[in-house]
Amino acid sequence: MTTTYFVLPQNSINPLPKEIGFFIKNSEFWYLWIREVEFSKHALTRMESRGISKEIALQVVNYPDSVLIQDESTTVYCKLVEENTKPYLCRVFVNSIKNPLLIITAYKTSKTEKYGS
């Protein structure tokens, strides 16, 4: 099992289920430990058709701007990314019950106002 650490400002943190990982807090930031992730066949197919590389998806999961709990098994990681000088919101949907975590789909949208950043 590999571990990844990433940092988020305090005001962007939502509590996460224990199955995803756990938070460590210092005076200014929350640090999140997250388990290894894998990609479903569906995710790889959709990501290829949408022009999203594995590297971008992993960047979103490891360094999100926000994390949303969609339901008890699905967590959505969101990050503003730039492509050809145009900003896009990339959203990666993860099955947080699976071990290792399973990326189930991802998409990018220019509707950053609608989905937040």
Image (spheres, helix red, strand yellow):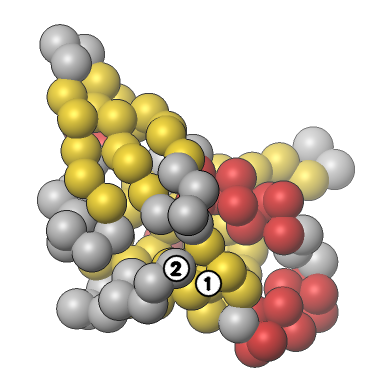
Q: Is residue 5 visible?
A: yes
* Residue at position x 79%, y 37% in the image: 85
Nearer to us in this view, 115 or 23: 23
Residue 32, image x and y in percent? 31, 38
Question: Residue 19 falls in which quadrant of the image?
Answer: bottom left
**Residue 24: image tag:** none
- Location of residue 99 with respect to 62 vertically, above or below: below
Q: Is residue 89 visible?
A: no
Q: Foreground mark, 2 or 1?
A: 2
* Residue at position x 17%, y 24% in the image: 25
Residue 36, image x and y in percent? 49, 57
Q: Is the residue under label 1 in contact with that under label 2 (CB below 8 Å)?
A: no
* Residue at position x 52%, y 62% in the image: 37
* Residue at position x 57%, y 69% in the image: 38
Judging by the rendered image, the residue that carries numbered circle 2 is 100
Residue 78, image x and y in percent? 46, 53
Q: Is residue 53 left or right of residue 103?
A: right
Q: Amino acid at mark 1?
A: Ile
Name the secondary structure under disc 2.
loop
Judging by the rendered image, the residue that carries numbered circle 1 is 103
Q: Residue farthest to the right?
A: 84
The crowding category of the residue bearing disc 1, from other C-alpha atoms within 10 Å (few below 14, some 14 to 19, many at least 20), is many
Q: Is residue 13 left or right of residue 59?
A: left
Q: Amino acid at mark 2?
A: Pro
